[in-house]
Amino acid sequence: MPISIVDANLSEAAHGAGLVRILDEYARLPHIAGCGLSDDVQENLVDRLAATSGKQILLAVDVGRVVGVAVCFEAFSTFAGRPLLNLHDLAVTADYRGQGVGTMLLNAVANRARELGCCRVTLEVDTANPGAKKLYDRSGFVMTQEFWKKELAE
């Protein structure tokens, strides 16, 4: 059975657990965070996402196992006067990398953005992640500007 791309059903335990597992594995990569998700995030992420409006979460599933995730949030482009879709997280479990799962997820994200009437898909990529940059370049993404951020104290 081939890998399928499905909408995450956050009330389905396997989807929620798979999402957290993949994001935790992704966060542990040295060029991402270098450590796993905190206990609080692991325990509450699914419920917090479920309560968040404008989310689009796609999962790559192979025989019932979540092997990749794309977590997106709807936003709005004031310059285009249309919605856009921000790809916040794209992650594929280690044993499925290099098999086209990331490309499948990116294609599904682009299709979802079209369905929503979006003018574009946006994303951020760490400069220390050359594999992701190659994937995004191959998929038609173009770097257009720097991204700045300010962390806020809790």
Image (cartoon, rainbow, N blue to C red):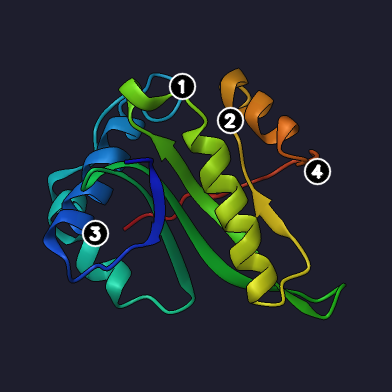
Q: Mark 4 vs mark 2: which is more N-terminal?
A: 2
What residue did someone put label 4 on?
A: 145
Give the image location of residue 135, x and y in percent: 64, 29
What residue did someone put label 1 on?
A: 31
Q: Mark 3 vs mark 2: which is more N-terminal?
A: 3
**Which one is in front, 140 or 47?**
140
The quarter in which the C terminus is drawn is bottom left
Task: Estimate the spatial distance between the alpha carbons at disc 4 and disc 2, rounded to whole Å.
Answer: 13 Å
Residue at the spot 31% in from the left edge and 41% down from the top edge? 1
CB atoms of marks 1 and 4 within 8 Å = no
**Which one is in front, 58 or 62?**
62
Q: Report the amino acid beneath label 3.
A: Leu
Q: Report the amino acid beneath label 1.
A: His
CB atoms of marks 1 and 2 within 8 Å = yes
What residue did someone put label 2 on?
A: 126
Q: Crowding at label 4, few (<14), some or many (≥20) Cα neighbours within 10 Å?
A: few
Q: Please tell me whether residue 128 is drawn above or below residue 40 in the rendered image.
A: above
Give the image location of residue 33, x and y in percent: 38, 30
Number of marks drawn: 4
Task: Estimate the spatial distance between the alpha carbons at disc 4 and disc 3, rounded to whole Å.
Answer: 30 Å
Task: Estimate the spatial distance between the alpha carbons at disc 1 and disc 2, rounded to whole Å.
Answer: 7 Å
What residue did someone put label 3 on?
A: 45
